[in-house]
Image: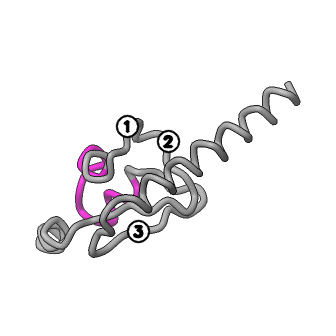
Amino acid sequence: TLEFVAASDVYKRQVQREVNRQLSQNEAPAEYYVVQENDTLSEIAKRFATTYLELAAWNGIADPNMIYVGQKIGFDEEILAEMIEKLP
């Protein structure tokens, strides 16, 4: 199992590099949230009065269960304004 864990860590680093590469190629959103350790897309969505599905769609996240520390979850200005209106 030690080899499996090591392979898993290597895979996670490769995926993180690819996510960062793709994000750096996209036009930078007006605002973004940087994923912290133990964050979930659902928890982030709650903070911004939206859903994890909307966040995933806006950010091109194929698997909402796979986000990474340091990943930027972006919001464009229009979407951000809509979310602010939803806040209590």
CA neighbours of label 2 inside 10 A, class few (<14), some (14 to 19), many (20+): few
Identify which residue, 41 or 3, lies in the foreground.
3
Is mark 3 in CB contact (under 8 Å) with mark 1?
no
Left or right of 56? Residue 6 is right
Write down the residue under mark 2.
66
Tell me, yes or no, if residue 88 can be seen here: no
The verdict on residue 40 being magenta is no
Amino acid type at circle 2 is Met
Circles 1 and 2 in contact, beta carbons < 8 Å: yes
54 shown above or below 50:
above
Report if residue 53 lies within the magenta region. yes
Q: Quadrant of the N terminus?
A: top right
Q: Residues within 10 Å of mark 1 (few under 14, many from 20)?
A: few
Task: Name above or below for residue 58 compared with residue 35.
Answer: above
Q: Is residue 59 left or right of residue 67?
A: left
Tell me residue 39's x, y (percent).
51, 56
Query: Where does the image place residue 60, in percent across and percent down from the top left?
Result: 32, 46
Cα–Cα span, label 3 and label 1: 18 Å
The spot of residue 16 in percent (x, y) is: 58, 49
**Residue at the disc numbered 1:** 62
Give the amino acid type for the residue marked by disc 1 in the picture: Ala
The residue singled out by tag 3 in the image is 33
Instruction: Tell me the quarter of the picture where residue 70 sits.
Output: bottom right
Going 47% across and 51% down the picture, which residue do you hit? Answer: 40
Magenta part, dominant SS? helix
Q: Residue furthest front?
A: 25
